[in-house]
Image: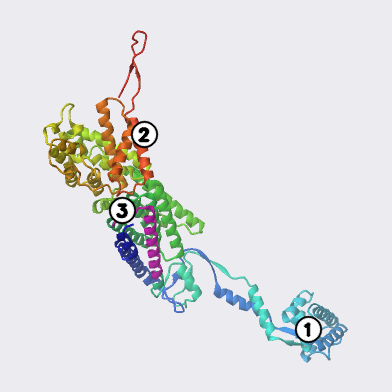
Amino acid sequence: MNSGEDDRKGNFLTRSNLELLALLAVWVVVLSSIYSCGWWLRGKSNSFAVDEPAPRTFYARYGMNYKDEDMALWLKEQWSKRAFGVLLYEPEKAREVAEKLEHLGNGYYSNMLDSKLVYLLDVLPEEKRNNLLKVISLAGRRLLKSHPISISEEDIWSELEASHLDSSERNVAYQVLLGIFKMAMQLDTRSVKAYRDYLKEQFEPVEKRLKVGDVIVWRGEIVTPERAEILVMQGYLPEKFPWKYVVSLALMTILWGMWIRWYLRRRGMLFNFKNEVMVTTAMALGWVLLGVTTYLGGVGVGVLPLVIWLYLILEPSVAFHLVLGAGILGVLASPAYSLMDLILGFVTVSASTCGGYLFIPKVRTRDKLFVAICAIGVLVVLAVLIAMFGFSLQINWETVVIFVLWTVLSSVIGVVFLSLWEVLFGAMTPLKLVELTHPSHVLLKRLQLEAPGTYHHSLMVGTLAEVAAESLELNSLLVKAGAYFHDVGKLRRPHFFVENQRPGENVHDELAPSMSALVIISHVRDGLELAREYKLPLKIRDFIREHHGTTCLQYFYKKAKMAGDYVSVSQFCYPGPKPKSAETAIVMLADSVEAAVRAVWQEAGVAPDIEGIVCDVIETKIKESQLDETPLTLRDISVIKESFIKSLRHMYHSRKVTSLEPEDGKLEEGQNGK
């Protein structure tokens, strides 16, 4: 690593980091603005304040189960009041209570009870009174035996409920026993409180079912904290602007942006600034569409245009991460305020992202794009219906129809705006590349008519490069398109190039070597001029500009030296630049290899040593440092070499041909069949 790289590594304020900070700032501003607009449009008229009267009647938007804390608290209080009191024995008086209970069983009571109780017993018939006293005596003795330390009023009632007494007799018996036990016991307030708390803990919480349309809070009713939680889950917002939520959204956006940068750096796929602006613009439009569709009833379906754009423009693995992350952030920033809206939004984004990964990378025509979009739409609708069924949500078919319509409309928007990225940012979608490589393209038709040899050479180079790119999992369509147009500059003077010359004719025999080199080298400049004239994309122009790198025309240079001319080698070298990408490097190698193999095959008339020629050409390019600025590794170069050898053997194979007519009893064999 050189010192300049060390300085950049130690300095945080590099161009790359500044671009990242600018992009993160744009993302945060866009998402925060979308959330603020949604809150102002929807939340302002649906807000509430805790412990304040409700400004309107709030209805349930989704069915849900919840625990009614207010009702549970009231029922607990009522349940705990069943504990009237807890009595503790005084040990020295316990025997006195037992004696009184025995006297009651024998019919003696007048000197032991309160005058009111004595009166109640006196008015009873003698037989009924004696029977009641025996029941009281037995119940009291059982209580003494089963509760040796303390006894509660609840225990007395429980004991009497097991007897055969009617309600009035049971009430008299309770009063008698309570009066007797109070003589030997004292009321313990601590025990009463502890027992009541125990009863409260035994009480199960009250769970209720809230149906769609049920009233949560009536207008003018105080909004309790418990009701406020339900309102928030239903999508109603507090009166105060949720700054904490916006800050959390901003932090999540920053963390996600840094993770995306790390992921791209690890994959060796960092975007240039123009591509970063393109992706940011696409995501911003996607976020706006997410907010609009969610506000109008299509929760999350606004992500579909973003799915179409990014999967057609970027590699599927990169598009997957960008769409999924951007879609989730878009749902969080959209007016999806209820818990169920968020869940359905996440389901929609996840289904769209997975559907895009499965269907869109295979698209090569607009018909197949339409089929892929339909498949993604069906997948999204099914996923949402399954989620609604799983969460026991009421499936309103009117809502489903609105959701489907927004799905269709979002897909149409995605297709309509697809050309925007091709025009403004030069994005190379598969559809655009297929159009470029079609033989009906104006420049390709000119090559067919005016430079047929160059056209055939370009097709051969395209085939070689496309297969090699597929072996490295690169954009093979882009490589093929670049190969088709890399020599388009030869249209200006096609007869100066050997593939367009008739056998035995060579215009360079009558030209000075320096003039021949000037004409040949100029086909790069001429190609760029034609590319601008016919508005070829910038990425295709890179193939024209870089397919020769800075290589030199050694044949004409040596010819000039042999003629005694005082020339510089720079006069015979292409101006460059060297290939910057793996794609342009593959086309450079395929161009040189195809030309070398074809030259040997035409000169010798037999199948050339393909492996030797391929190895020599690639080694020469490496020695001349033509691949130094590309991301190709030694393994990649080895894969390219094997791919070229395999493809060329299919193109230039030879076979033995047996004659159909016997001669002297033997069959003649032909060779070099083509």
Q: Are marks 1 and 2 in contact (CB under 8 Å)?
A: no
Circle 2 residue: 646
In magenta segment, residue 14: no
Quadrant in the picture for residue 350: bottom left
SS majority, magenta: helix
Under tag 2, what secondary structure?
Answer: helix
The kind of residue on which mark 2 rests is Lys
Lower position in the chain sequence, tag 3 or tag 2? 3
Q: Measure how far apart labels 3 and 2 are at the Cα level.
A: 44 Å
Quadrant in the picture for residue 453: top left
Q: Are marks 3 and 1 in contact (CB under 8 Å)?
A: no
Q: Nearer the viewer, residue 88 or 546?
A: 546
The C terminus - image quarter: top left
* Closer mark to the observer between disc 3 and disc 1: 3
* Closer mark to the observer between disc 1 and disc 2: 2
Q: Which residues are magenta?
A: 246-272
The kind of residue on which mark 1 rests is Leu
Lower position in the chain sequence, tag 3 or tag 1? 1
Residue at point 29%, 42% (across, down) = 621
Q: Residue 343: image x %, image y %? A: 45, 60
Instruction: Give the side of residue 554 with respect to residue 292, left or right.
Output: left
The kind of residue on which mark 3 rests is Ile
Quick check: can you spot residue 32? yes
Query: Number of numbered discs present?
Result: 3
Circle 1 residue: 177
Under tag 3, what secondary structure?
Answer: helix
Residue 567 badge: none
Q: Residue 38: image x %, image y %? A: 35, 67
Instruction: Give the side of residue 50 with respect to residue 454, left or right.
Output: right
Circle 3 residue: 413
